[in-house]
């Protein structure tokens, strides 16, 4: 271990003093804890209900190529790096946890329903091609040949064979099991306050008053990451919640003739609203998702469910025959540039692993590896450096404040 990564224990600290305290037991906190424990660090996690985060709602698309957006080329690099790690990550996690995580190499089909959608998809295809990504333009007929349940009106689409899926509930459960087997200690309570000593993060105080001390602290509280008391203002992560409502339906085992109801993830933008259908091997069909800026509200609304079913029905009319099994809503932790905040902050000993927005499940492997590396060695790996929390410092290069200072006469 790098000598400066974990400071000497303060006098009077108990033998149980872990090297790392992770605040937040969602998939990002859990993968950080598991991977850090794998590096020989003693790790504790504080969360009232570990494994209960937004991943329980998520569709689990590993959509590095199909969720590409203009201006997010740097994020694309991280997304692709994580997608490439998934096969090995899956093997390691399934071995460590003794559970399957539902990683499915099914590919994705993005389709257009009208001329506007098709123009939008042509632009996405051009951007993907310029970025060197594998994506094939198909006619409507070719799309329906691949997925016979698609609406007859589908006007064209993109076949992306490299965008797969994983089952986020199984992923979460496996991460919990792997953490437990690796000796991670769980404190099932809410962290109420970050504690500091000698100018560095020293642990946390839980809601019941228990004080936990640790060599380093990782704040992985999802959309709540900016709300922890005791974090100095300059270090508070600029993360806000973006609500997503999701439905779960049950598909028949097979259609007459033996074909699957859907064989791959199908998505589209319908009148400006992204909609996706993720078919699991178990027969579950995840239908998502709304995107709403409503603070920490997680109500499932009639309007949200109506819009999802309306748009998905235009895409795959047969979904209205399927049993509706569940409706739920989660909060995507979102940063000002839609990319995560990874690694050390200005406050020595405090790291962030948050702000993963729409890509939390996809970014789980690379986040775990990057955080374990920085916790064990003090070095944030190259792939994660563009996502340092420092980019949001008021005086970071390129920030408005920095530009104003540069423009001041000397
Ligand atoms: N990545 C899909 C979503 O956030 O809805």
Image (tube, rainbow, N blue to C red):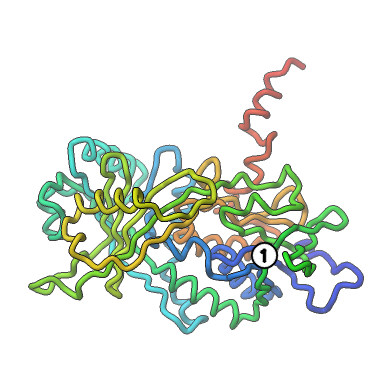
Residue plotted at (79% across, 58% down): 195
Q: Secondary structure at mark 1?
A: loop
Foreground pick, 408 / 320? 320
Q: Residue 179 at what x, y percent from top left?
A: 59, 77
- Above or below, 204 against 230 in this view is below
Residue plotted at (59% across, 60% down): 370
Foreground pick, 326 / 403? 326
**Residue identifier under label 1:** 190
In the current view of this chain or complex, which residue is farthest to the front?
Answer: 302
- Say which quarter of the image contains residue 369: bottom right
Instruction: Mark 1: give few (<14), some (14-19) or many (20+) Cα within 10 Å.
Output: some
Q: Is residue 305 left or right of residue 140?
A: right
Q: Residue 39 at what x, y percent from top left?
A: 65, 73
Q: Is residue 300 left or right of residue 143?
A: right
Quadrant occupied by the C terminus: top right
Q: Residue 229 at what x, y percent from top left?
A: 73, 53
- Above or below, 51 against 82 in this view is below
Residue plotted at (88% across, 56% down): 198
- Say which quarter of the image contains residue 13: bottom right
Q: Is residue 107 left or right of residue 367?
A: left
Q: Residue 146 at what x, y percent from top left?
A: 15, 60
Quadrant occupied by the N terminus: bottom right
In the current view of this chain or complex, which residue is farthest to the top?
Answer: 409
Q: Is residue 73 left or right of residue 225?
A: left
Residue plotted at (46% across, 71% down): 171
């Amino acid at each position: 271990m790098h000598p400066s990564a974990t400071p000497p224990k303060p006098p009077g600290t108990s033998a149980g003093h872990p090297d790392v305290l992770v605040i937040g037991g969602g998939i990002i906190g859990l993968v950080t804890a598991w991977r850090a424990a794998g590096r020989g660090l003693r790790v504790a996690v504080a969360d009232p209900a570990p494994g209960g985060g937004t991943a329980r709602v998520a569709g689990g698309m590993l959509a590095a190529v199909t969720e590409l957006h203009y201006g997010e080329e740097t994020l694309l690099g991280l997304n692709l790096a994580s997608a490439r790690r998934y096969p090995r990550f899956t093997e390691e996690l399934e071995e460590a946890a003794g559970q399957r995580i539902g990683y499915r190499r099914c590919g994705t089909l993005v389709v257009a329903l009208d001329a506007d959608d098709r123009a939008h998809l042509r632009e996405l295809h051009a951007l993907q091609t310029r970025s060197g990504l594998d994506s094939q333009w198909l006619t409507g007929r070719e799309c329906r040949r691949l997925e016979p349940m698609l609406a007859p009106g589908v006007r064209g689409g993109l076949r992306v064979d490299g965008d797969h899926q994983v089952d986020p509930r199984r992923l979460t459960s496996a991460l919990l099991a792997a953490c437990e087997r690796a000796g991670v200690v769980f404190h099932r309570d809410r962290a109420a306050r970050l504690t500091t000593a000698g100018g560095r993060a020293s642990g946390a105080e839980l809601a019941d008053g228990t004080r936990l001390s640790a060599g380093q602290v990782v704040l992985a509280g999802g959309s709540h990451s900016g709300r922890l008391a005791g974090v100095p203002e300059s270090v508070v992560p600029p993360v806000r919640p973006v609500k997503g409502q999701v439905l779960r339906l049950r598909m028949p085992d097979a259609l007459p003739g033996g074909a699957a109801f859907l064989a791959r993830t199908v998505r589209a933008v319908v009148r400006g609203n992204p909609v996706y259908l993720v078919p699991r091997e178990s027969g579950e069909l995840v239908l998502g998702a709304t995107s709403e800026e409503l603070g920490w509200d997680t109500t499932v609304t009639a309007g949200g469910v109506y819009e999802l079913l309306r748009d998905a029905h235009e895409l795959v009319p047969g979904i209205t025959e399927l049993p509706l099994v569940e409706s739920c809503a989660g909060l995507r932790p979102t940063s000002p540039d839609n990319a995560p905040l990874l690694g050390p902050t200005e406050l020595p000993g405090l790291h962030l692993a948050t702000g993963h927005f729409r890509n939390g499940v996809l970014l789980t492997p690379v986040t775990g590896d990057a955080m374990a590396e920085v916790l064990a060695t003090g070095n944030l790996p190259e792939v994660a450096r563009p996502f340092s929390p420092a980019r949001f410092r008021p005086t970071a290069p390129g920030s408005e404040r920095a530009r104003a200072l540069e423009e001041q006469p000397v």
